[in-house]
Amino acid sequence: MMFEKVLIANRGEIALRIHRACREMGIRTVAVHSTADNDAMHVRLADEAVCIGPPSARDSYLNKAAILSAASITGADAIHPGYGFLSENADFAQMVEEHGFVFIGPTPDHIRMMGDKITAKQAVKDAGIPVVPGSDGSVDTEETALEVAAGIGYPVLIKATAGGGGKGMKVARNADELVESWKLARNEAKAAFGNADVYMEKYLGHPRHIEMQILADNYGAVVHLGERDCSLQRKHQKVLEEAPSPALNADQRARIGKIACDAIAKLGYRNAGTIEFLYENGEFYFIEMNTRLQVEHPITEAITGIDLVREQIRIAAGAPLGYTQADVRFAGHALECRVNAEDPQTFVPCPGRIEGYHAPGGLGVRVDSGLYSGYRIPPHYDSMIAKLIVFGNTRNEALMRLRRALGEYVIEGVKTTLPLHNRLVQDADFVNGDYDIHWLEKFVAQHS
């Protein structure tokens, strides 16, 4: 039986995205929101809205009890967590199920498994996915750090086991740097995640960040929906993504796709998930698995014609995928720009009132955003305010369309990163698809 009512435990463009998918499926929606989001677009459009707390995310969007209470009083059948906030919180997923609701995502056990990077790395390694050479577990002493580094060779990357967003991550190019970097990484990890454990991997010099989108139902069927190239990053935060990757051919895509699907099947995973890799010299190395919807999911939708949020909901309701890998068709090229309310030079957040707004349109152009003229961007949350997605039959067509769409996009009243994207899409290296995960940092430094 399909759900009658879904509570959306998120905000901003992703809450609106989930609402739209539900509405097209004939499902009523409940928006939960903080007092800072009283006038948010997803709150306006939802069938019901429940205020769950003050502006602080800790007291609202991270308040498990308030969200569950809202689901109870509105009679929701299921909860969709979106991305961020509680989307990868295994305890929350477990609480959702224990209170009689359906969590639209994977099982709590799989969220927990992939949430610890050491456990995740071992699990996928056992399932047949290649991993970056590194420590077998956490590196708890200076002596162990030096021993592991000597075994895998410098440079090495020290990473927080509970990490994310680049926190608790340090590079050491020799033994002298290693001890200090190890200490700094542990201190950062403790401050950011309450867990000082770190592990170590071989540092790859010029890799690309490639991720595979997978879908798995409750009956053992697994498909992949191709890869996304997310190499354009600043401080480990993605800025622009494209699908397919200009670095891969059909054979490479099929090879890593099969490896990913086989591993997911062995793990018994269900719902949507993304396996992230570093790709260098024709080889893939596992980084992590995200057990949720990705920000950049629209570019996969563009090249496959498959609505990922709809599929998440169908799978959670017990429906089979209803198609095989052979049925999945890849066509064209898609690019996504993340538009942030930030100074395009300093990247300092710039919340405030939208004085004027005009979204681009036309063939092959999609904008995922909750912005409107008069809306006030609150200062309490992530600064991403929109996603501009374009599709073309070829990469060049998509790129030309993106340039045109960026030229049409008007956001007045706050500073945004639109000027950065306008510069980026004119650069010869980007036009040629010749970049790696370090390229954007250098590009930004040259234009600052």
Image (cartoon, rainbow, N blue to C red):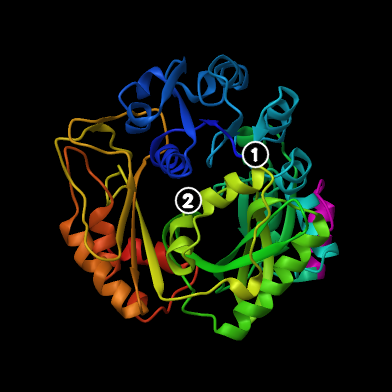
Q: Where is residue 348 in the image (x, y as percent from the top left)?
A: 32, 41
The residue shown at (49%, 36%) is 27
Q: How crowded is mark 1: few (under 14 residues within 10 Å), some or many (20 or more)?
A: few
Q: Position of residue 9 (x, y in %)?
A: 53, 30
Callout 2–callout 1 Cβ contact below 8 Å: no
Q: Is residue 80 magenta?
A: no
- The amino acid on which the numbered mark 2 sits, given as a three-letter code, is Val
Upstream in the sequence, badge 2 or badge 1? 1
Q: Where is residue 412 in the image (x, y as percent from the top left)?
A: 15, 42
Q: Residue 1 carries which label?
A: 1
Q: Which quarter of the figure has residue 102?
A: top right
The residue shown at (63%, 65%) is 323
Say if 252 sits above or below 166 in the image: below
Say if 103 sits above or below 211 in the image: above
Q: Which quarter of the figure has residue 13?
A: top left
Query: Which SS class for mark 2?
Result: loop
The image shows a total of numbered marks equal to 2
Q: Is residue 134 visible?
A: no
Residue closest to the eye, 243 or 423: 243
Report the span colored magenta.
133-151
Q: Is residue 373 visible?
A: yes
The residue shown at (55%, 32%) is 4
Is 97 on the left-hand or right-hand side of 360?
A: right
The residue shown at (77%, 68%) is 262
Residue closest to the eye, 132 or 425: 425
Residue for badge 2 = 295
